[in-house]
Amino acid sequence: MHPGASAIVALSDDGRVLIERQFRYPMGREYLEIPAGKIDHGESPIQTAQRELLEETGYTARQWAALTQIHPAIGFSNEVIHLFLAADLTRHERGVQLDQGELIETQWMQPDVLVDAVRAGRLPDVKTQIGIMHLDRMLRGEWAWPDFHEV
Amino acid sequence: MHPGASAIVALSDDGRVLIERQFRYPMGREYLEIPAGKIDHGESPIQTAQRELLEETGYTARQWAALTQIHPAIGFSNEVIHLFLAADLTRHERGVQLDQGELIETQWMQPDVLVDAVRAGRLPDVKTQIGIMHLDRMLRGEWAWPDFHEV
C-alpha cells in the first residue's frame, strides 16, 4: 500500500514556476522537478503539499487549487500523486528544512522554457512534465483554471 | 534494477489512436492505456514495443519513431518507459496473445477525445497521458514529428 504523494506547481506573481534541481540516487542523475513528497500518516494531500512546499523551498502559498491526480505505476503499485496549483507565495522566515540526504536547489523558470524542455526530452519526471503541460493549457486559455481557495 | 518498459502510441491511417481498456489489480479499477510492457532480457526497447503491440492488440506496424522517454518513479526506482509512435498498421493473422491474467480490450479513439479525458482527469496513467499530450502537439503542428523508420 503506497501512502500516495503530493506535488505542487507553484506560481510567482509574474507567472514563473518554482522548480527544484535535485540529485536522484535511483537514477544516478539530477532532475528538474516540481516540489513533491510522500503523504505522512494522518495528513490530507493538501496538507502534505503545504508542508513539502515549505520544507523544500521555504515558501508558503495563500492560494491553492487541486489540479489533477496521476497514477505513475498502475502495473505494480497503487501510488497516486495529487497535483496542486499554488499562488500568492511568500518566503517564510523559517526557511528551507531538508530531510537528511536531500540536496535541493530551487529556481524560478518560465513556463515556455519548461514546455520546450518537455519537447526536448529534458523533463522526463512524470509529475513535473504533466504539471507543466496542464499549466501551459491553462495559460493559453484552452483549459479552465480550477478554483483557488485561500488557505 | 528495473528492466524498463516500452509503450506505443499507435496511429490508424485516419488519425485515431489504439487504446486498451485494462483492469489493473494494484489500483482495483479499469484504465484506458496505450499498449505497453516490460523489456524482456536481451530485447531492445523497440523490439519490446513491436512484441507488445502484437501480443496485446494483434497489430503490427511498418513505421516506427522514437517519441520520448519518461521516468515514472525517480524517488525509488530507475524505471524508464520508452515511448514510440507506430503507424501503417496491419492486423496480423496470429491475433492477440495475452499473458495469463491479462484482460485487455482494444478500441480506436480520436486524439481530441483523449485530450479531453486528460483535462477531465480520466487518463491518470502517466505513459498514456504523456503520449497523448505529445501527439496532440504534433497534430497541431506545434512540435515537429520525429523521424519514422520502416521496420
Image: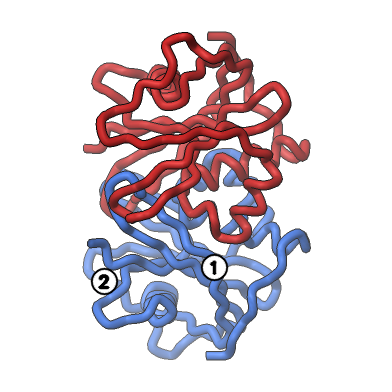
Chain colours: A red, B blue
Which residue position is annotated with label 2?
A: B99
Q: Is residue B28 visible?
A: no
Q: Quadrant of the N terminus of chain B?
A: bottom left
- Label drawn at residue B9: 1
- Amino acid at the residue labelled 1: Val
| Chain of the residue that carries numbered disc 1 in the rendered image | B
User: Does residue A122 sit above or below A101 in this rendering?
Assistant: below
In this rendering, position of residue A129 left or right of residue B14: left
Q: Give left or right: position of B15 versus A82.
A: right
Q: Secondary structure at mark 2?
A: loop
* C-alpha gap between disc 1 and disc 2: 21 Å
Q: Residue at x 63, y 46 (%)?
A: A114
Vertical placement of residue B4 versus A101, above or below: below
Q: Where residue B17 appears, x then y in whole percent?
A: 59, 66
Q: Measuring 58% from the left and 90% from the top, which residue is drawn there?
A: B150
Amino acid residing under circle 2: Asp
Residues tagged 1 and 2 counted as in contact (Cβ below 8 A): no
Q: Nearer the viewer, residue A116 or B27?
A: A116
Residue beneath the point at 54% across and 45% down: A130
**Depth check, front residue: B90 or B149:** B149
Q: What chain letter is assigned to the residue under label 2?
A: B
